[in-house]
Amino acid sequence: MIKSFVISAAATAVALAPASALAGPYLNPEFNGATVGDDYLGGALNLDVGYEGGEGAYSWFVQGGPAIIMPQGSENEVEFAGKFGGAVQVAESVSVYGELSGVTGDEFSWGSKLGLKYSF
């Protein structure tokens, strides 16, 4: 159910965005690895395609694609991963950003990110 929500929300964001707000498509290949202490747990290679846009103080993005999950000591699996998020500029040099992400699998995994960016 959550997987369907994330995919539907991402598709809706693209569909509802005005054409002038689309800055354009992009590719975002990304590898994420994990360790605990000296133990390497494995990694994931995401091969995402995305769209980003915005207007004025607001920006947004949505991306997704295959994710090759490579756990240490186990066979690789191919799943689907996606994320969407955005940012709001709250002052000349300060913006607040957020992101929701998810990946399919035996159990759907999701994450969130919220932050502040100060440019100088």
Image (tube, rainbow, N blue to C red):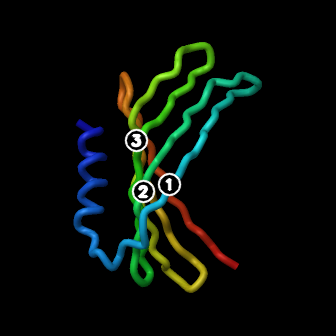
Q: Earlier in the sequence, mark 3 or mark 1?
A: 1
Residue located at (60% from left, 40% from top)? 31
The residue where tag 1 is placed is: 27
User: Quick one: which residue is furthest to the right in this view?
Assistant: 38
Within 10 angstroms of label 3, few (less than 14), some, or many (20 or more) residues? many
Residue located at (55% from left, 47% from top)? 29
Looking at the image, residue 65 lies above or below residue 78: below
Q: What element carries label 3?
A: strand
Looking at the image, residue 59 lies above or below residue 37: below
The residue where tag 2 is placed is: 50
Query: Residue 41's x, y, as percent?
Result: 63, 24
Q: Is mark 2 on a helix, strand or loop?
A: strand
Query: Residue 21's x, y, as percent?
Result: 35, 76
- Residue kind at label 1, given as amino acid type: Leu
Cα gap from disc 3 to disc 2, whole angstroms = 15 Å
Label for residue 102?
3
Within 10 angstroms of label 2, few (less than 14), some, or many (20 or more) residues? some
Whether residue 106 sits left or right of residue 116 in the image: it is left
